[in-house]
Each structure stands twice: as structure tokens, then as C-alpha cells.
Image (cartoon, grey):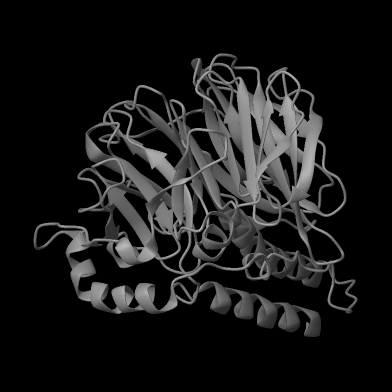
């Protein structure tokens, strides 16, 4: 039990560290577009969400307490028609019908882990996936209940899809094929397994076929970066792991047969950004260590476009949106920004947002969830002006080390073994949640 106590202490420390919600330096890490309004975008940050309704000229702030959200998490977000916002977070699947002013949890999801959300191109339908720990069996296997939820009326109502998901899987991502909304992809892995798993449904989530995602040593997770806009069988997956040298690493895997087999086309520091051109012919990736890269989808031979540090990517029409940090943006372009656009493949950048230019708290009626943000704004405004910046690469991955397989203890008692496995996984899951938060999703 000494080993179990040690793991409890480690897990407690991990949770305590993860709970420092505003202890992180301000950074932007996911940009999503409204499907029915080209001027409306939402930017996920380490201190809440930012909304613009004038194509980025002004940005309003939504505080984390409005959702509510706790701890160091960067939830997957998406936008639906009519100003609907969805946030898949540790507290549940949260939705707002009025552009972030009012929030509630989808029935049955509160206090349960919502892992990911993805929408269809029409802006009316979306899927989200829950992944809730249930038990550890006598063999030490961790078991989960995974539930895929679907809405076809812009989040007014949700239904559970009937397809069964392997209860040993820890889920990483879910996505839809733009050319075939019946095609659903889900990634995950079984704790301790040497490879990841891709679940593929061709019947709208009624059934899933599992395929192996090949991992290399020290890889922990596989995340769907995008599905090609015209070919439902062409899937881009990015992995994340940690080397013995303490460096975070990613690979870009590509499947052209619906997740059955994969080729590896790029490897390097943790890939924080991924975007496809609207026709799928051009692929963009980026990270902090190496900058912005691009390749033709036909050959996937990547070349560096810019050394600008990349923290997220998104593309609409011919414009590439790039999240960076103010230190790197000044060094590389002479301008200070955390979000910029480029229409010439990184030869030049047009600043869209600097931290000190955030207009203020989002304007919402008294009594709505977001009304609380007005009270928190003065403190944040001071911090943004005084401490603007982002995490360094080492800071961004400091919490991402996978746990060791044991703590120097031995146990032969089956119950102790099960307790040990559960506690070890608790720490593993906390670490992986932090890892997941570093991988910004591509804009839907």
C-alpha cells in the first residue's frame, strides 16, 4: 500500500497543478468559425474564450467561470448556426444558445467528462463523445462508458447513438467526414497497449469497426487532425508522445483507406496546429520549435514557410489563420500579436489580435451566466497589459511526462494490484488530459 499512497500523492499533486486555471500565461490555442456568419469567430484561450462578430476587428472576452470550467483545460469547442457555442470539457458537455451569454449542460452529461465535439458543414448537426471511468476489474483493466451524442437541430436536443464502443478505450477525439456525415471517426487507446485504435462508423454511429493506429515508443495518444473535405476515406491523424530526453514529439499519420492503414509523413516537436485548404489540396502544420510548414496533399513533402511559433492553425477560403505568441511575433515579423492571418503562405502576416487590444467582457444581460465576467475583467485587463506573453515550449510540455510504470514498489496481492492500476491510471489520465489540451483542434 506504500506504492498506492505514493501514487495518491502524485495524483493529488497533478490535480492540484491542473487546478491552477489562471496560473498559465495567456495564450490562444483554437480558432473556430461560425458556419452561418463569415464575420463571426471564437478563439479559445488559456483564460476563457474570445468572440468577434466583425471579422476580428474587435474581440470580447468570456470568462471561464461563466461556463463554468475549472482547472488547466482547453476544451474542444465548436460553433453552430444562430450563435450556438458548444464546449466539451471535464465538467460535461456545455452549450450556449446565445453566443456565450447563457450556458447549461446537456442533460445527463454534467460532472462527466466530455472529450470532444465536431460539427457538420451545414452548421445544424454535431456529434460529441463522453468517456467516463466506470471500474477496474480484477485483472486491473480500466473500464469506461463511452457515449456518442448527436444533435440535428443546432444543440436544442441531443440523442445517444446506439453503436457500442470498447469499454477499455480512453477516448481522444471524434470527427465527421464533411463529404459523408454518416462516416464517424473516433480515436482512443487502451491503457498500457502499444498502439492506438481508430473506430470507424459508416452508418451514423450505429456500429463501429476498430483498426490499429501504429504507435512508436513513448507515444500516448492519437488525435484526428482532419478528414478530407471531399474524400471520406482520407484521414489525417497526429500523435503525441514524450521522449526519454523529456521532449514532446508528434507524428503526422495519414490513412487513405478509411483508417485501416497509415503512412507516416512528418515528425517533430508537438504539433499544435493543423489546417487543410478548403479543397483539401494543401496541408498546413505548425509547432513552437520549428514554425509553420506546408505541403501538397498529393505528396506530403513539407517545407518550412516561416519560423513563427505556431500554437494553432485554421483556414477559411484562401486565408490561413495562425495563433502565435507576442514574443515570437515581434521577433519574426516586428508586430505583436497572438492571432494573425496570411494569404501568401507565410511570407507576410496581418495581425488580427494582440492581448492588450481585447475590448472587454462580452456584453450580456443581467442574470445570464456571462454577467459575472464584468466583475473579473479589471483584474484580467491589468494582467494582459502587464504580463502579456505565452508559455514557452518547455512550459507547455512540463506537465506532459507520462508516469513511470511503477514507483519502485512490488505488489502481488490482486486487490492491491487493481488499486495500484487504478491509481496509476488516475495519474496517467491527468497527465494525458494536459497533453490533450496542448493539441489544438483544427477548425471545423
Choose top left, top right, bottom left or bottom right for residue 111: bottom left
Considering every residue shown, the one lying at the far left of the view is 366
Whether residue 186 is visible to the viewer of this picture, yes or no, is: no
For the residue pair 297 and 264, the one nearer the viewer reads as: 297
Choose top left, top right, bottom left or bottom right for residue 171: top right
Q: How many numbered tags mark residues here?
A: 0
Locate residue 356, reporting x and y percent. 34, 67
Q: Which residue is drawn at the image coordinates 66% and 31% (left, top)?
A: 236
For the residue pair 134 and 33, the one nearer the viewer reads as: 33
Q: Which residue is drawn at the image coordinates 77% and 68% (left, top)?
A: 403
Q: Which residue is drawn at the image coordinates 19% and 69% (left, top)?
A: 374
Q: Is residue 19 above or below residue 443?
A: below
Locate residue 160, reporting x and y percent. 43, 33
Q: Is residue 201 above or below residue 62?
A: above
For the residue pair 290 and 41, the one nearer the viewer reads as: 290
Q: Quadrant of the N terminus?
A: bottom right
Amino acid at each position: 500500500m506504500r506504492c498506492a499512497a505514493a501514487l495518491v500523492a502524485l495524483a493529488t499533486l497533478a490535480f492540484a497543478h491542473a487546478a491552477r486555471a489562471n496560473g498559465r500565461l495567456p495564450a490562444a490555442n483554437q480558432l473556430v468559425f461560425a458556419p452561418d456568419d463569415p464575420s463571426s469567430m471564437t478563439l479559445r484561450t488559456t483564460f476563457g474564450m474570445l468572440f468577434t462578430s466583425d471579422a476580428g476587428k474587435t474581440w470580447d472576452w468570456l470568462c471561464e467561470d461563466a461556463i463554468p470550467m475549472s482547472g488547466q483545460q482547453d476544451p474542444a469547442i465548436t460553433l453552430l448556426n444562430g450563435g450556438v457555442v458548444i464546449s466539451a470539457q471535464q465538467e460535461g458537455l456545455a452549450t450556449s444558445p446565445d453566443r456565450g451569454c447563457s450556458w447549461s449542460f446537456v442533460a445527463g452529461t454534467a460532472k462527466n467528462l466530455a472529450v470532444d465535439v465536431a460539427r457538420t458543414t451545414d452548421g445544424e448537426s454535431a456529434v460529441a463523445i463522453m468517456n467516463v471511468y466506470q471500474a477496474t476489474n480484477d485483472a486491473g483493466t480500466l473500464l469506461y462508458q463511452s457515449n456518442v451524442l448527436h444533435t440535428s437541430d443546432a444543440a436544442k436536443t441531443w440523442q445517444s447513438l446506439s453503436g457500442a464502443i470498447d469499454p477499455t478505450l480512453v477516448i481522444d477525439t471524434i470527427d465527421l467526414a464533411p463529404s459523408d456525415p454518416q462516416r464517424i471517426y473516433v480515436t482512443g487507446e487502451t491503457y498500457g497497449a502499444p498502439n492506438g485504435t481508430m473506430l470507424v462508423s459508416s452508418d451514423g454511429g450505429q456500429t463501429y469497426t476498430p483498426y490499429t493506429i501504429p504507435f512508436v515508443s513513448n507515444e500516448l495518444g492519437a488525435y484526428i487532425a482532419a478528414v478530407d473535405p471531399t474524400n471520406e476515406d482520407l484521414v489525417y491523424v497526429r500523435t503525441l508522445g514524450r521522449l526519454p530526453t523529456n521532449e514532446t514529439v508528434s507524428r503526422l499519420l495519414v490513412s487513405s483507406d478509411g483508417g485501416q492503414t497509415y503512412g507516416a509523413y512528418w515528425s517533430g516537436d508537438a504539433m499544435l496546429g493543423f489546417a487543410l485548404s478548403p479543397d483539401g489540396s494543401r496541408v498546413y502544420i505548425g509547432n513552437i520549435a520549428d514554425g509553420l510548414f506546408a505541403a501538397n496533399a498529393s505528396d506530403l513533402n513539407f517545407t518550412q514557410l516561416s519560423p513563427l511559433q505556431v500554437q494553432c492553425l485554421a483556414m477559411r477560403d484562401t486565408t490561413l489563420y495562425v495563433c502565435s505568441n507576442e514574443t515570437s511575433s515581434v521577433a519574426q515579423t516586428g508586430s505583436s500579436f497572438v492571432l494573425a492571418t496570411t494569404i501568401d503562405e507565410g511570407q507576410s502576416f496581418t495581425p488580427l489580435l494582440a492581448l492588450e487590444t481585447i475590448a472587454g467582457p462580452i456584453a450580456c444581460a443581467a442574470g445570464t451566466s456571462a454577467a459575472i465576467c464584468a466583475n473579473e475583467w479589471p483584474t484580467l485587463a491589468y494582467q494582459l497589459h502587464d504580463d502579456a506573453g505565452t508559455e514557452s515550449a518547455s512550459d507547455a510540455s512540463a506537465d506532459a511526462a507520462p508516469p513511470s510504470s511503477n514507483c519502485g514498489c512490488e505488489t502481488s496481492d490482486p486487490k492491491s494490484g487493481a488499486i495500484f492500476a487504478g491509481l496509476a491510471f488516475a495519474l496517467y489520465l491527468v497527465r494525458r488530459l494536459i497533453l490533450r489540451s496542448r493539441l489544438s483542434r483544427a477548425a471545423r
